[in-house]
Image (cartoon, grey):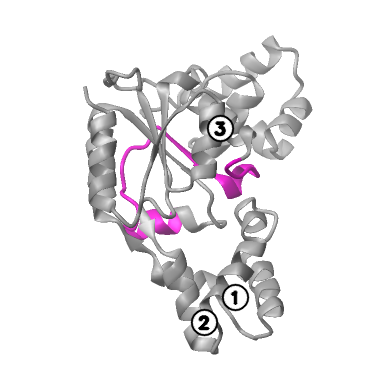
């Protein structure tokens, strides 16, 4: 996405005034501090984060492109009507969860299934941003009756890129608008991108659960992602490894593809088939 930064603050201010919102109203609706919004409107922040602008756009009931004056490159539409593809991260672009829990189990002399269950017990709150990583580590250690566990360290070291899906995502980005829609711990999407464990591409939008306080399969996160894409649900495709997430997206009118990380080559080929031009 190419963002026209000039005049962004003025467009936000005019859009806010048009719908009768004060700065305080918009701050509350977009979960922003007053000082941040004030600086954006007067142009003191030249490049606000895409997550901040997405929240402002959603609060003003505008598409991201409408608000930022972005010029999205012309892309294709598949035979089935898909023009935007959201890819999951964990279990789709990277394989990590079982490897991380297995290593913790080995290091602490525990059963792997007990470690995995303990992680899952707190995972939604971590991915929602309701827990910090330190708080998650503390609760995980208490539940497992161990000390000094650093889930984030195991998490990053165990994350293994699924090259077949990296290639499929790169191919999709050449023909369609693409984004990431992921349940993930705070700060770790950025770390995955920096480490190259997730492809570094010009994504149209990034929906990071920990930054917006919503997790899949909640309906609200799919509504948020659709608004961020600026498209009706029937033009959106979700590629995900979790069936509950796919069912939730289908209920919202999305098209879906299940990614089976045990068969990455077959699954990647299926993504290309569904997106046939």
Q: Which mark is residue 222?
A: 3
x and y, in percent, of residue 83 in the image: 35, 22
Closer to the observer: label 1 or label 3?
A: 1
Residue at the (22%, 46%) spot, across then down: 167
Question: Which residue is nearer to you in this view: 18 or 228?
Answer: 228
Q: Marks 2 and 1, Cα distance to the nearest angstrom?
A: 8 Å
| Range covered by the magenta-colored residues | 190-217
| In front of the other: 239 or 20 | 239
- Image depth: mark 3 or mark 2 in front: 2
The kind of secondary structure element at disc 3 is: helix
Residue at 46% across / 77% down in the picture?
A: 102
- Give x and y (percent) for residue 87: 40, 41
> Which mark is nearer the camera, 2 or 1?
1
Where does the image place residue 246, in percent across and percent down from the top left? 49, 38
Above or below, comparing residue 89 to residue 114 in the picture: above
Image quadrant assignment for residue 136: bottom right
Q: Are marks 1 and 3 in contact (CB under 8 Å)?
A: no
Residue 274, horizontal then vertical, whole percent: 29, 30
In this rendering, would 233 be left or right of 37? Answer: left
**Mark 1 residue crowding within 10 angstroms, few (<14) / some (14–19) / many (20+):** some
Q: Are marks 2 and 1 in contact (CB under 8 Å)?
A: yes
Residue at 40% of width from left, 70% of height from top? Answer: 158
Q: Which residue is mark 2?
A: 105
Residue beneath label 1, please? 114
Is 43 drawn above or below residue 180 in the view shown?
A: above
Q: Which is nearer the N-term, disc 3 or disc 2? A: 2
Q: Is residue 196 magenta?
A: yes
Q: Residue furthest top?
A: 18
């Amino acid at each position: 996405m190419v963002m026209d930064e000039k005049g962004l603050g003025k467009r936000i201010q005019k859009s806010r005034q048009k719908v009768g919102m004060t700065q305080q109203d918009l701050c509350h609706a977009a979960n922003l501090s007053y000082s941040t919004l004030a600086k954006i409107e007067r142009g003191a922040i030249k490049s606000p984060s895409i997550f901040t602008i997405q929240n402002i756009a959603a609060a003003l009931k505008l598409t991201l492109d409408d608000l930022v004056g972005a010029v999205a490159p012309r892309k294709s539409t598949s035979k089935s009507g898909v023009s935007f593809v959201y890819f999951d991260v964990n279990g789709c672009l990277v394989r990590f969860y079982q490897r991380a829990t297995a290593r913790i189990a080995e290091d602490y002399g525990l059963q792997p299934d007990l470690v995995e269950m303990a992680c899952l017990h707190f995972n939604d709150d971590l991915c929602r941003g309701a827990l910090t990583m330190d708080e998650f580590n503390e609760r995980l250690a208490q539940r497992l009756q161990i000390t000094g566990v650093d889930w984030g360290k195991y998490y990053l070291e165990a994350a293994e890129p699924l090259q077949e899906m990296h290639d499929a995502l790169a191919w999709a980005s050449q023909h369609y608008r693409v984004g990431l829609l992921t349940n993930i711990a705070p700060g770790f999407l950025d770390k995955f991108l920096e480490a190259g464990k997730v492809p570094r591409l010009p994504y149209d939008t990034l929906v990071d659960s920990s930054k917006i306080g919503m997790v899949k399969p909640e309906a609200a996160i799919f509504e948020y992602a659709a608004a961020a894409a600026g498209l009706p649900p029937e033009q959106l495709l979700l590629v995900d490894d979790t069936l509950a997430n796919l069912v939730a997206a289908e209920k919202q009118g999305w098209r879906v593809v299940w990614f089976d990380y045990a068969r990455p080559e077959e699954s990647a080929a299926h993504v290309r088939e569904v997106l046939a031009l």
